Image: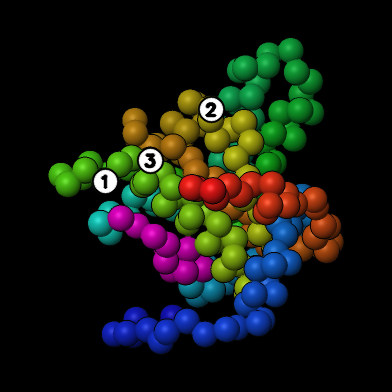
Amino acid sequence: MTDTPTSFPLPTHRPEVVEFLATRRSNLAKAMEGPGPDVATRDTLLEIAARVPDHRKLAPWRFVIFENEARSNFGQHIATAFMAANPTAPADRAIFEGARLTRAPLVVAVISSPVDCVRGTPVWEQELSSGAVCFNLCLAAQAHGYGAQWLTEWYAYDAGVNAALGLSGNERVAGYIYIGTPTLPASPRVRPEPDSLMTFWGS
């Protein structure tokens, strides 16, 4: 990416951006294939992902990257954890669980990593920032022409899997972001009507 400018222009109406956001839809990880982003593009996506609200500039998140054989290698930890919790499950289920990260050529685990802040930025605000990173990464990937899906699934909450991921005691998985070339168009889904979610204070 280019060097960060010293100042930014005022917002302007960008119809193409509005249309992109208005029609955005996640792409299914199971319907992705290669190619994924090259190294330069991947790093650009992560730079964009980090451009989120971050109270006191703590950067309370980090990235774990899964590419190539690392996806299936880490999948063995997922398969082991699943079979430990489900010892009577058939062997082919272990194979399925172990292949979860191979659904897309690039998987990024966004780790919520709250920082002890002397001035007291609430952990909740830091966790919200991690969620914003997940979504910004999805937007960046799709703006570059890739499919993206933000998933957690059971293994994001499994202690054994998280130990293999290298999480410390205060860290949590905010999401696994699957990025690749979509093989199917995203299908529409019902969205809530804004009127049903709004109240007007004082009225």
Circles 2 and 3: CB atoms closer than 8 Å: no
Magenta residues, as a range?
Answer: 45-55
Label 2 SS: loop
| Residue toward you, 67 or 2 | 2
User: What is the total number of numbered labels drawn onto the structure image?
Assistant: 3
Protein image colouring: rainbow
Label 3 SS: helix
Whether 88 is drawn above or below 111: the answer is above
Q: Which amino acid, by three-letter code, is at mark 1?
A: Thr
Q: In terms of image quadrants, where is residue 92?
A: top right
Q: Which residue is mark 3?
A: 124
Distance from label 3 to label 1 (Cα)?
8 Å
Q: Nearer the viewer, mark 2 or mark 1?
A: 1
| Residue toward you, 78 or 158 | 158
Q: Sequence-wise, which precedes: disc 2 or disc 3?
A: 3
Direction from residue 95 to residue 81 in the image, left or right: left
Whether 113 is drawn above or below 92: the answer is below
Determine if residue 8 is in view: yes
Residue at image location 42% in from the left, 62% down from the top: 52
Q: Nearer the viewer, mark 2 or mark 3?
A: 3
Direction from residue 176 to residue 114 in the image, left or right: left
Question: Residue 84 location in percent, x, y?
Answer: 61, 17
Q: Which residue is mark 1?
A: 121
Distance from label 2 to label 3 (Cα)?
21 Å
Q: Which residue is mark 2?
A: 158
Is 49 magenta? The answer is yes
